[in-house]
Image: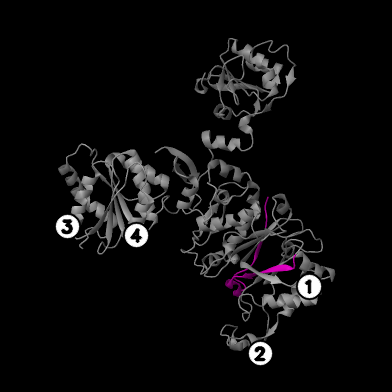
Amino acid sequence: MKSGLMLRDPTAETSSGLRARVAPLASLANKTIALMDIGKMRGDEFIDRLEQLCHAQGLKTRRYKKPTNTRVAPREMIKDITGNCQAVIIALSDCGSCTSCSTHDLNDLDKNGLTGVSVLTEEFRQAFESQKSAIGFDAASVYVPHPMQNRTTAELHTIAEQAYDAILAAICSAKAPNT
Amino acid sequence: MSAGNLPTDGLVIFAKRHCETCAMVERVFEQLVRSSLPTAVLTQDDPTFPTLVKAVDDTELEQSFRFDVETVPTVIRLKNGKEVARAFGWNRADWERVTGVRDLGVELPAMRPGCGSLSREPGVWEELVARYGDSGLASRRIPIGEWNDEIETCFDRGWSDGLPVVPPTDARIMRMLQGTSRQPDEVIGLVPPNLVPISVEKVAINAVLAGCKPEYMPVILAALEAALEPEAAMHGVVCTTCFSGPILVVNGPITRAIGMNSGINCLGQGNRANATIGRALQLIIRNVGGGRPGELDRAVLGGPGKYTFCFAENESDPTWMPLSVARGIAPGKNAVTLFQGDGIQGFIDQRSRTPEQLTKSLAMSLLAVGNWKLCEFTNAMLVLVPEHYAIYRDAGWDRHRITRELHMAMVRSGRDVIQGALGVGEGIDPRRKDEMVNKFWPEGLLIVHAGGQAGLFSAICAGWTGGRFRHESKTITKEIRL
């Protein structure tokens, strides 16, 4: 992300410079989690495993896939998620453009009242922080090891299993939801 | 030669094509470039100028800023990277002294003034300070991505009242601060409802957001000082479930100087000073004080005046005593009066011919403020238009007489306005049934003269309900410090 205009804060600066995110849900019972595949290769395999883990716990999910990771989600998709889901997991960003676009998607959904989390590879921690700062949104994230494009499906599933608890904790205040 | 490749021991010369003196001394530039001193000629406006020597492109004005060039041409002698002498404009003796080169431009007149440096043109300097210097601003920096829309960013950050705001860049803030002699770090007071200290710099940032011009700053600062007086009860006005917000009336020559509207449509849209001064105060309350609708601002309905409500009083009629003078400010001085009030209730009377008729008529409408049966409960501001005032003026009534007669016309029997009377639950304390009751406190009716010359339509602004606490919530007038 390139740097642009620099503004000065007109507020009392008593709070973070970032807009607070929608609070995590108290419980995932009777809620639908949107699993948003950003459209990047291999992300679907990671999400496949997340979906299995959710279903194994009785959690309801709804699957989405963006046409491309290089653009923000179509308005219809945002509308569908907003209308049918109460939380969103966006995965899996492992490049600059998908990090930027997926953060905008997360911001868009947050402004529509959905709590959410973005899953990214470690390499893009700084890019995500920069994008958060540029948007002014205190977005939630979970990082997984980088790289991921050269992993086997089994390895991707293992990474998903290792990240699962942290991902759920980001959208549900009960860290170990017992639903 | 690049700007980063200037001689540390030698000469730097600043020039621009659109300067006749620079063009005249082109031969001198050539003489100096061919001398034994390393010499760089920096051009501010056209990289192809001067034509006789190769110029360093300073169209970004970075070096002009760093060398603090005020006039072109300027020649600067550097030793060990430090300036040791400078001359500006064309003065052969000065240039020979600075450069140590003799017989410069012998065919030229001995002296010719230069032109202003582009780096010193209005609006440019602050941009250059923001880009290359130290703005001295203390507020938190908010970076935004190159591809992010800055207006949308301001919305997303919650800095807006719902309308687009002007993004507060360093250059804009610095220009705004030039509108006041007060230091940026001076603290004006504590802004409710969060009671947060506010500096002049924060005022300037919010004035930028609001779309103000620098010359509005003294008015904004005085309005803020008025709002922060404990008796302004701004904490209550911000958080109230009522409709109210600060209504600002500005008096004095500054209203003409900054182009405020006291005439046609002065309570409406279309005048930048009226619109943005009131808006700046509201944005300060929102952004610094934390008074955001739905959070601590709990107005059940609110009102359009909460975007902005600010106007100037018409002081063109010498028979009319301005509001500020009536409130103790010396004639001819600038002042802001802050009235805690609502939107307007139109007053229509196109038939009254005498002051007595008009007073009775006005009293009928004024009695409706808040509730016809409530007394000494809210204050009111009457904006008296020229054609209505003319009826009074022609009969010899002045501000004091009008105010007095209106109060007298609104005295009623308590029996008619106590709670339950006339089948209406609302009203005054039933224990006052045997009293004759005033509608307003003696100081609770403000009259302002404003509006276009044609139209028998005055306006009444109801005050907020905190006015019932006579000594706790008062109209505030502050002299404007220039």
Could you tell me if residue B258 is visible in this image?
yes
Q: Earlier in the sequence, mark 3 or mark 4?
A: 3
Between B340 and B309, the one lying in front of the other is B309
Say what amino acid the circle numbered 2 marks: Asp
Residue range (magenta): B455-482
Q: For residue B181: magenta? A: no
Please give left or right for residue B468 compared with residue B455 in the image.
left
Secondary structure found at label 4 = helix
Camera-nearest label, 2 or 3: 3
What's the CA distance linking mark 2 and mark 4? Answer: 63 Å
What's the CA distance linking mark 1 and mark 4? Answer: 64 Å
What's the CA distance linking mark 3 and mark 4? Answer: 24 Å
Residue designated by label 3: A56
Secondary structure found at label 2 = loop
Say what amino acid the circle numbered 4 marks: Gly
Chain under numbered label 1: B
Residue extending furthest toward the right = B395
Say what amino acid the circle numbered 3 marks: Ala
Secondary structure found at label 3 = helix
Chain under numbered label 4: A
Residue A153 vertical placement versus A50 (above, below): above
Camera-nearest label, 2 or 4: 4
Q: Position of residue A29 (x, y in %)?
A: 24, 64
Q: Are discs 2 and 3 located on one and the same chain?
A: no
